[in-house]
Image: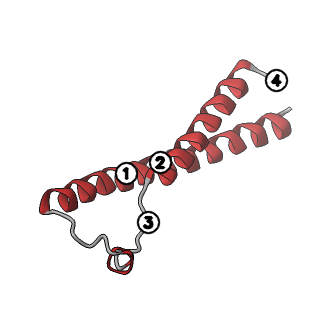
């Protein structure tokens, strides 16, 4: 294995862990659940705070996911041309 393959493999693992972590930090989209459990007395500030955090995590989910797919394509192209180039 070349050092480039090792570096790309490590970066691919980091992107995969990043996608998993960002998705797990997001809140669920069950907005009516609060009225069932009786915790529907949220303040205006707590609603806006959660929206901004959710929006931040949603943006980073997109960015990291795109980076992950680009890394997958790059690693596959590298391996394809390395194997069939020789």
Task: Compute the Cα span from label 3 to label 2.
Answer: 13 Å
Residue named by callout 4: 1
Looking at the rendered image, the disc whose residue lies closer to the viewer, 3 or 4, is 3
**Which residue is pictured at 82% across the width and 23% down the height?**
1
- Mark 2 nearby-residue class (10 Å; few <14, some 14–19, many ≥20): some
Mark 1 secondary-structure assignment: helix
Quadrant housing residue 37: bottom left
Specify whether residue 66 is in view. Answer: no
Q: Which mark is residue 22?
A: 2
Please state which of the two labelled residues, at mark 1 or mark 4, is closer to the viewer: 1
Dot placed on the residue nearer the N-terminal end, 1 or 4: 4
Is 4 in front, or is 14? 14
Q: Earlier in the sequence, mark 2 or mark 4?
A: 4
Residue 55, compared with residue 71, is above or below; it is below
Q: Position of residue 81 (x, y in %)?
A: 76, 39
Name the residue: 21% across, 65% down: 42
Query: SS of the residue at dot 3?
Result: loop
Q: Quadrant of residue 6?
A: top right
The circle drawn on residue 57 is 1
Q: Position of residue 12 (x, y in %)?
A: 63, 37
What whole-number distance in Å separates the C-alpha atoms at marks 3 and 4?
42 Å
Crowding at mark 1 (Cα within 10 Å: few <14, some 14-19, many 20+): some
């Amino acid at each position: 294995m070349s050092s480039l393959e090792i570096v790309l493999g490590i970066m691919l693992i980091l992107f995969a862990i990043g996608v998993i972590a960002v998705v797990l930090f997001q809140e669920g989209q069950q907005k009516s659940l609060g009225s069932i459990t009786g915790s529907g007395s949220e303040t205006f500030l707590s609603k806006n705070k959660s929206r901004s955090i959710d929006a931040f995590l949603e943006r980073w989910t997109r960015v990291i996911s795109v980076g992950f797919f680009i890394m997958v394509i790059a690693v596959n192209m590298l391996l394809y041309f390395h194997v069939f180039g020789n």
